[in-house]
Image (cartoon, coloured by chain):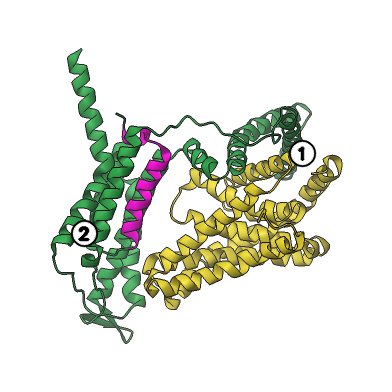
Chain colours: A green, B yellow
Amino acid sequence: MKGFKDHNPIAVTVYFLAVAGIAMFNMNVVIFTSLLAGSLILFFIYYRTKSAKTHLFSVVFFITMAILNPVFSHNGVTVLFVMNNNPVTLEAILYGCFTATVIIAVLYCFRCFSQIMTSDKLLYIFGALSPKTALILSMSLRYVPLFGGQIEKINKAQKALGAYKDDNILDTLKTGLRISSITITWAIENGITTADSMTARGYGSGKRSRFSVFRFCAGDFLLIGIISLLTIVTLFGIKDMKYVYYPAIVPPKTTLFGVVGYIAYALLVLLPVIYHIKEAVLWKYLRSKI
Amino acid sequence: MIAIKSSKIRGTLKIIIPFLAIPLLVVLGALVFDANKYLLVSLGVAVLAIILFIAGFEKKTTGTRRMVIVAVMTALCIAGRFIPLFKPITALTIITAIYLGGESGFLVGSMAALLSNFYFGQGPWTPFQMLSWGLIGLIAGYLATPIKKSKIFMCVFALLSGVAFSFIMDIWTVLWYSGSFNPGLYLSAITTAIPHTVLYAVSNLIFILFLSKPFGEKLERIKIKYGV
């Protein structure tokens, strides 16, 4: 048994694709409200941040979108007032609010996704697709801090050689250019040395294999099974979830399939939270036994 | 692609796939799904194009040295994205493409977009950024000879690619926002993005003017010295 983010990266990716995909391509109030709620809960679990600044963007974005849509779209039957000979309708305002909510919900969802999907997990997925690309990706990731360290070394050496002697902007700029030029030459030469070393050790002589710390175990199959089941149930109900926004907002008829679909989607969204609670309870229980 | 022996046919296929098959897919997708599912179709196409390209790259025998150089250039692009306001990522992609070919350019552009988004935020826009930067690299690779020959053409290409990147990303913004393509909204998206577009284009121009000569010399030297 393990927490949600300890599952195989493929299972986690499938989960986020299913959750975001259903919400992005199905403009339904219930669907994206549950996505927003679920993502926000997950966001607070992972980030534990209380500062309002992180959410400021969402609020500003929401207000801008709610104002922008009625300016460009004049569809809708309920005219609230007329501005510059153009009707401003209730439907357009509501539609703007709804799309803004979907976008904000998906943004939060992806922020949680990037918290879970660290670069090593991405490499695992790319490795399954193409070991060569995965190699390029992992080398580039390693090079970024390596170049940073090298720039510092070169900077110190140049300083000892008398750089930054004249205290003016032109000199600083010139030295900066010099240092970046040295770093780039060094980086490319270093890359060639690495490549030769790789060839000498037999890289490319046989079929490329790959190593990864992730395995597929029963828990992952279980997770993928649950995700697929909930997604299929939601998709069955999707025909009964179709909102009509223009010319007038018509919510779909409440049917059994639709309601079951809503419940399935809400469960799908809350799946990581459920895993999290389960882990916390288990932890408490195991500790109480000591 | 591996089964085809003739290099001529392979070369033609390489051009046909990105410029013919993908637009065809877009049209087909719009016909099969109802017209409001542009977003789904465009996202699928972007991901598919990248996967197609990577699969083609996997099958080819590439020198280890060339691969490592691509990784180095990608890392430099990522590091460059931390410079405030001015981003050298497009300029570096173009330079790589000119000296190492369109395939390397595509890889540098798309991989830099993917990896730097770990620092700047992943999202549904990542495949679009990957494709836009990758295509800039690919096209620069096809136009390598004229770009190398004339400095004016190089500057025009850098400016245009900055504008094109902004316009393509705005298409995505509009699609994501309204679900269908609304020309009025697109126009307003472009207008509000004018400062960004200008900044993109100008920073491309500055970086390509400053970087093309030193980078070109370094890459050319490596090519002659080590035969990449």
Q: Nearer the viewer, mark 1 or mark 2?
A: 2
- Point out residue A191 in the picture as x, y percentages from the top left corner: 72, 36
Residue at point 27% right, 59% down? Answer: A235
Specify the label residue A219 is tagged with: none
Quadrant where the C terminus of chain A sits is top left
- Point out residue B201 in the picture as x, y percentages from the top left corner: 63, 63
Quadrant where the N terminus of chain A sits is top left
Left or right of A284 in this view: B216? right
Q: Are there few (<14), some (14-19), or many (20+) residues within 10 Å of tag 2?
A: some
Amino acid carrying label 1: it is Thr
Residue at point 24% right, 67% down? Answer: A239
- In the rendered image, the residue lying farthest to the top is A290
Specify the label residue A30 is tagged with: 2
From this view, report whether residue A104 is shown above or below residue B38.
above
How many numbered marks, from 0 up? 2
- Point out residue B165 in the picture as x, y percentages from the top left corner: 57, 63
Specify the label residue A185 is tagged with: 1
User: Magenta region: which residues?
Assistant: A3-25
Left or right of B40 in this view: A42? left
